[in-house]
Amino acid sequence: MRILHTMIRVGDLDRSIAFYTEILGMRLLRRQDYPEGRFTLAFVGYGPEDTDAVLELTHNWDTPSYDLGNGFGHVALAVPDAAAACAEIRARGGKVVREAGPMKHGTTIIAFVEDPDGYKIELIQHS
């Protein structure tokens, strides 16, 4: 078994695709409209779906926004240098909500950015 994808609901699909591709550097792998159900699915990631876990962005056409709730935590991405990643994300128009530094009660260097819908993306520094 392996993880295939994680699904998040987004209010503005084009804005979310732009964030994940232009700011975080993922690729749009596929996008499909489902007119009968009034929704669109878009899959983004760093590698192909047959080998890599990806994100499924679900846009329900009649829902402009969602309450994030308190059960969802974050999506984590490995980066070689968390501070440099924050600088690059900020330069591309992304929102850094926690600068790079050691995690609380540990030494791993982490940072957090936020997507247009408010989902947190953790950047974990891996040398």
Image: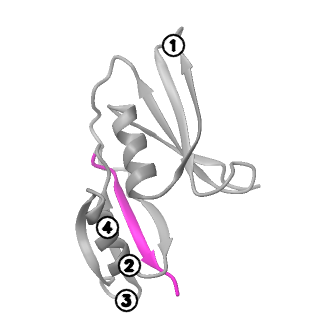
How far apart are the alpha carbons under marks 3 and 4?
Answer: 16 Å
Identify the residue at horizontal 63%, vertical 54% (top origin): 53
Q: Tag 4, which secondary structure?
A: strand
Q: Earlier in the sequence, mark 2 or mark 4?
A: 2
- The front one of 27 and 114 is 27
Identify the residue at horizontal 38%, vertical 78% (top origin): 82
Q: Which of marks 2 and 3 is nearer the N terminus?
A: 2
Q: Residues within 10 Å of mark 2 (few under 14, many from 20)?
A: many
Q: Name the residue under label 2.
A: 82
Looking at numbered disc 1 in the image, what kind of residue is underneath it? Answer: Gly
Q: Tag 3, which secondary structure?
A: loop
- The front one of 91 and 58 is 91
Looking at numbered disc 4 in the image, what kind of residue is underneath it? Answer: Phe
Q: What stretch is highlighted in magenta?
A: 118-127
Residue 83 lies, in percent from the top left, at: 32, 80
Give the farthest residue toward the top. Answer: 36
Q: Earlier in the sequence, mark 1 or mark 4?
A: 1
Residue 37 badge: 1
Q: Which of marks 3 and 1 is nearer the N terminus?
A: 1
Q: Are marks 2 and 1 in contact (CB under 8 Å)?
A: no
Q: Is residue 93 above or below residue 31?
A: below
Q: Tag 1, which secondary structure?
A: loop
Q: Mark 3 points at which residue?
A: 106
How far apart are the alpha carbons under marks 3 and 1?
Answer: 46 Å
- The front one of 46 and 53 is 46
Q: Name the residue under label 4.
A: 112
Looking at numbered disc 2 in the image, what kind of residue is underneath it? Answer: Ala
Q: Do the residues labelled 2 and 4 touch (CB within 8 Å)?
A: no
Q: Residues within 10 Å of mark 3 (few under 14, many from 20)?
A: few
Identify the residue at horizontal 30%, vertical 59% (top origin): 92
Q: Does the magenta stretch include residue 97?
A: no
Residue 99 badge: none
